[in-house]
Each structure stands twice: as C-alpha cells, then as structure tokens.
Image: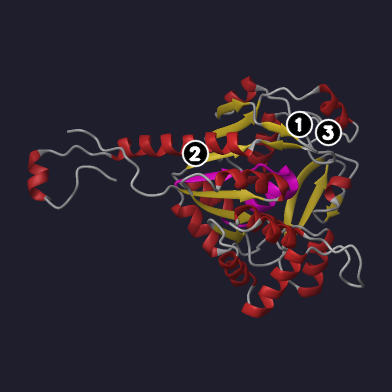
C-alpha cells in the first residue's frame, strides 16, 4: 500500500520570545504556510511599557505591540502610526502610540488579553499573539557575587555575570490559552531574543517549560548572532543552550539554528565598541549536548545586524514540513486482514 504522506492541515507553530529579534523573524515567517501563535514575554519594565505597567497595572505592552505590527497585514503608514513615539508633551513624551492603544483596548474590553485579540482583528494579524501570562511579572537576577538585581531593564546594567534569573511572583499564572497552543502545536520555536531578559522569562512561567518538554512537536531554538553586554558576554552557542537547560532542568530542543556567515570587520569593530561580539559556534560541544545543528549565513546588516528573516523562515518552514512527514510515516499502521475486518471503520494511516 502506498503511504500518503501529504500534510493535510496547515502546520501549527508556536513562537516564543520577545524583543526586536522575534519581530524581525516573524516578518518572514508570516509569509510561510504556517498557523502562527506568538507567545510574548511580559517582564519588560523599561520605557513606555514600564510606565504603563506601573500606572495602569497591565502587562507591559511594548513587545506585544512589536509582534502585532510584525504579523499585521496593514498599510505602511498605519505601521508608522503604531510605532510613533511622542517626543514632547506632558505625560506623552516617550510613549509609543501603539502602547497607548493597547492600554486603551484593555480598558475598552475589560481585559488585556481580550484587548490584544480585538486589536489583532483590526490589524488583520496573521496568527495569534498571546502574553505568556495575563499579569505583569517582575524579573530578577542573582549575580555571581550574590547580588540580586530587580527589573528587566536593570539586569543588563549589572557589572557582574548573571548566575540565574527568576520571576516574582514565583507562582505567576500562565495564560491557559498559551499552554493549549503549546499542547496543540506541530512545532515550537524559541528565539531569537535576549537570553536572560526575553527568552527565559517566558520559559520560567510555571508550566511553560514542562508543557514544551512533554510536547511531541518539533522543537527549535534560534540562537542570537551577537553577544549582549551585561547578559551573555563571551557566550558561545553551547553556553546559551546550557543556560536554558540549567534554568528549566532539561533539554527542550531538537534543533538549534545558528549563523555561520562572516560579519564584515568594520561591523565587528563597531559592535566591539559597545561590548558585543559574534556568538562563537562551538559545533562539537553543541553536538555533545544532543542537539542537531542548522548552520547558515543568516545575517543582514543595515543600521544594525539582523537575522535574514527570509532565509531563516525558509529553514524553519522546511524543518517543520520534514518533521511532519516523518511523524506521519511513523504513525502509519499496516494492519492485518483480521484486524481490518474487526474494525473496518479505522483507517490504516493517520493523516
């Protein structure tokens, strides 16, 4: 009997992270035949997000706004409007209009998560955008000298390496809809983004990492291209992976996607002046940890280094398709004639 390995539904992918890196990647991923759910960190406490968070008692809207704009199907001018940041005005200076709209949507709908959903409809967002938790979370870090730093915006300013990060409250409630999305996912993608202040705050929300670990989905991690001063100084790819394992207590991913393309010397020098360097790809150590590696030239340089969204999303889409095809073949059951007669309504293959 010929196996039918065609994928019969749009693959469901859950993308987890925060910050600029996640938004850049989603701009490419939304053009692939994938059903996207983005789970976004709610630990930001700086700038406009921090002010709205403390004054209105809402989850910080900044990363949510960035992801909504990245996945939206809107005119370029509307995107500029949402990203517009007031330069003057008593109480307005520093706020982005998109953040203010999200705050307003919370008041209009009575709930932040519902407000995000309703704004998603207005913006014709391709997929779903969900906060990791419906409540604002405080991120704290213990440094290697024992000092405790409070606040996502303050952690990178510390003068000592980070030993661990943790959440307050420790029993913060995950958004049940986010957990359901993980349980139903065909693929789960974490990153790119700041390791300690964008990635780990999501994974440390109770039940989040455990749900990922228990999932049979394809699990991928996109590593940052450059180290981040005050967070991942001198980190290699394996250092990023070990930090995640040490925080969640297990290995979560099947694949790690990394950049192995050259970066122009003048760009390297420019980043070195800010204390950043290219993340070293230590292939042997990554392999020893049990990860499969996808390495390619994945960077573009304009004003800043960014992931090549088109090339990166191409690799992700290919891995998802290959994974689902293999899983379907593994689930295919060839049954005996006696079993077929006993249960004629059952199909001999799982689609």
From the image, tell me which residue sits under label 2. Answer: 317
From the image, tell me which residue sits under label 1. Answer: 235
Dot 3: few (<14), some (14–19), or many (≥20) neighbours within 10 Å? some
What range of the chain is rendered magenta? 186-207
Residue 106 position within the rendered picture, expressed as x and y whole percent measured from the top left:
67, 74
Q: Residue at x 80, y 60 (%)?
A: 45
Where residue 76 sits, quadrant-wise, is: bottom right
Dot 3 or dot 2, earlier in sequence: 3
The alpha-carbon separation of the residues under discs 3 and 1 comes to: 10 Å
Q: Residue at x 72, y 22 (%)?
A: 262
Dot 2: few (<14), some (14–19), or many (≥20) neighbours within 10 Å? some
Dot 2 or dot 1, earlier in sequence: 1
Mark 2 or mark 1, which is nearer to you?
A: 2
Dot 1: few (<14), some (14–19), or many (≥20) neighbours within 10 Å? some
Where residue 88 sits, quadrant-wise, is: bottom right
- Against 101, residue 305 (above or below) is above
Q: Quadrant of the N terminus?
A: top left
- Give the colour scheme of this rendering: secondary structure
From the image, tell me which residue sits under label 3. Answer: 276
Q: Is residue 327 visible?
A: yes
Where residue 134 sits, quadrant-wise, is: bottom right
Residue 190 highlighted magenta (yes or no): yes
């Amino acid at each position: 009997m010929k196996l039918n390995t065609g994928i019969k539904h749009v693959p469901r992918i859950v993308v987890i992270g925060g910050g600029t890196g996640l938004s850049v990647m989603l701009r490419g991923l939304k053009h692939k035949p994938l059903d996207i759910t983005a789970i976004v960190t709610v630990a930001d406490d700086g700038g406009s997000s921090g002010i709205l968070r403390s004054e209105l008692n809402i989850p910080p809207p900044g990363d949510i706004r960035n992801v909504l704009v990245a996945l939206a199907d809107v005119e370029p001018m509307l995107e500029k409007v949402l990203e517009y940041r007031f330069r003057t005005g008593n109480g307005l200076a520093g706020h982005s209009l998109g953040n203010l709209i999200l705050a307003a949507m919370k008041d209009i709908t009575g709930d932040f998560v519902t407000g995000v959903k309703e704004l998603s409809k207005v913006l014709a967002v391709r997929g779903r955008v969900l906060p990791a938790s419906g409540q604002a979370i405080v991120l704290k870090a213990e440094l290697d000298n024992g000092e405790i730093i409070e606040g996502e915006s303050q952690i990178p300013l510390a003068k000592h390496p980070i030993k661990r990060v943790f959440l307050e409250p420790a029993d913060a409630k995950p958004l049940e809809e986010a957990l359901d999305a993980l349980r139903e996912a065909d693929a789960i993608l974490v990153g790119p983004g700041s390791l300690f202040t964008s990635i780990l705050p999501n994974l440390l929300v109770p039940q989040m990492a455990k749900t990922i670990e228990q999932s049979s989905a394809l699990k991928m991690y996109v590593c940052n291209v450059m180290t981040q001063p005050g967070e991942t100084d001198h980190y290699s790819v394996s250092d990023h992976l070990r930090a995640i394992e040490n925080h969640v207590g297990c290995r979560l991913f099947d694949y790690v996607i990394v950049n192995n393309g050259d970066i122009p010397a003048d760009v390297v020098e420019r980043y070195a002046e800010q204390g950043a360097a290219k993340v070293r790809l230590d292939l042997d150590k990554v392999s020893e940890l049990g990860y499969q590696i996808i390495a390619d030239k994945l960077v573009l340089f304009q004003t800043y280094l960014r992931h090549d969204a088109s090339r990166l999303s191409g690799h992700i889409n290919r891995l998802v398709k290959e994974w689902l095809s293999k899983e379907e073949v593994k689930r295919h059951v060839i049954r005996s004639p006696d079993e077929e007669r006993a249960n004629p309504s059952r199909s001999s293959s799982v689609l």
